[in-house]
Image: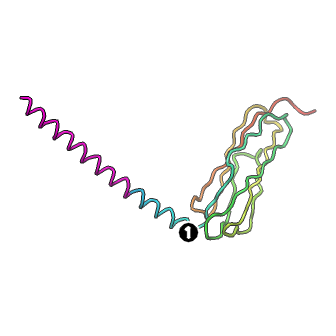
């Protein structure tokens, strides 16, 4: 009876080892394929690289206009074109680079939040539409508006 259990255990561990080997092969193959695809995508298009995508304005008095300029570099090898920058409401205004950003060139997206009439906490998303590998890039701003300016 003991021999039977030993054989059963050997078969069990052999099947687990085989499964692990198959899984390792799949992971290695998938990793190489994915890396190759990402490398060729980067080499054939425009790519955003932001130093920061979230900005916390902290606390501010109502009526204050808070602004921040998000800067980026085009790390791709094609010109980057920003088609549009969409904000959630009229309290958030955008300015952005409207000319093509050359490879290794710099661009900006300036966001201003008008706090007048908007008391309390805010958390806004800004969507960038472009020809980059990631055609929709989202930036975020947040803060807290208190009191009123007289």
Q: Quadrant of residue 13?
A: top left
Return the x and y of residue 92 as percentages of the image width and height.
76, 47
Which residue is at the front of the view, 21 or 89?
Answer: 21
- Quarter of the image with the C terminus is top right
Which residue is at the front of the view, 13 or 35?
Answer: 13
Return the x and y of residue 39 as percentages of the image width and height.
51, 64
Q: Quadrant of residue 77?
A: bottom right
Decide whether the magenta segment is chiefly helix, strand or loop.
Answer: helix
Q: Is residue 101 above or below residue 29?
A: below
Return the x and y of residue 86 as percentages of the image width and height.
69, 53
Residue tagged 1? 43
In the orientation shown, which residue stands out farthest toward the left? Answer: 1
Q: Residue at x 39, y 57 (%)?
A: 30
Q: Is residue 41 above or below residue 31?
A: below
Please tell me whether mark 1 sits on a helix, a strand or a loop.
helix
Which residue is at the front of the view, 124 or 67?
Answer: 67
In the orientation shown, which residue stands out farthest toward the right? Answer: 150
Return the x and y of residue 4 as percentages of the image width and height.
8, 33
Span colored in magenta: 1-29
């Amino acid at each position: 009876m003991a021999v039977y259990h030993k054989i059963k255990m050997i078969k069990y561990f052999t099947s687990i080892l085989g499964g692990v080997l198959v899984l390792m092969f799949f992971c290695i193959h998938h990793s190489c394929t994915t890396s190759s695809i990402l490398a060729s995508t980067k080499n054939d298009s425009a790519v955003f690289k932001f130093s920061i995508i979230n900005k916390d304005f902290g606390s501010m008095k109502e009526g204050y206009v808070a602004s921040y300029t998000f800067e980026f570099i085009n790390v791709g090898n094609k010109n980057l074109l920003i088609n549009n920058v969409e904000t959630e409401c009229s309290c958030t205004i955008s300015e952005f680079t409207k000319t093509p950003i050359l490879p290794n060139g710099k661009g900006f997206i300036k966001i201003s939040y008008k706090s007048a009439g908007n008391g309390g906490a805010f958390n806004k998303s800004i969507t960038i539409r472009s020809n980059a590998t990631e055609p929709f890039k989202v930036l975020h701003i947040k803060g807290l508006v208190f009191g009123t300016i007289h």
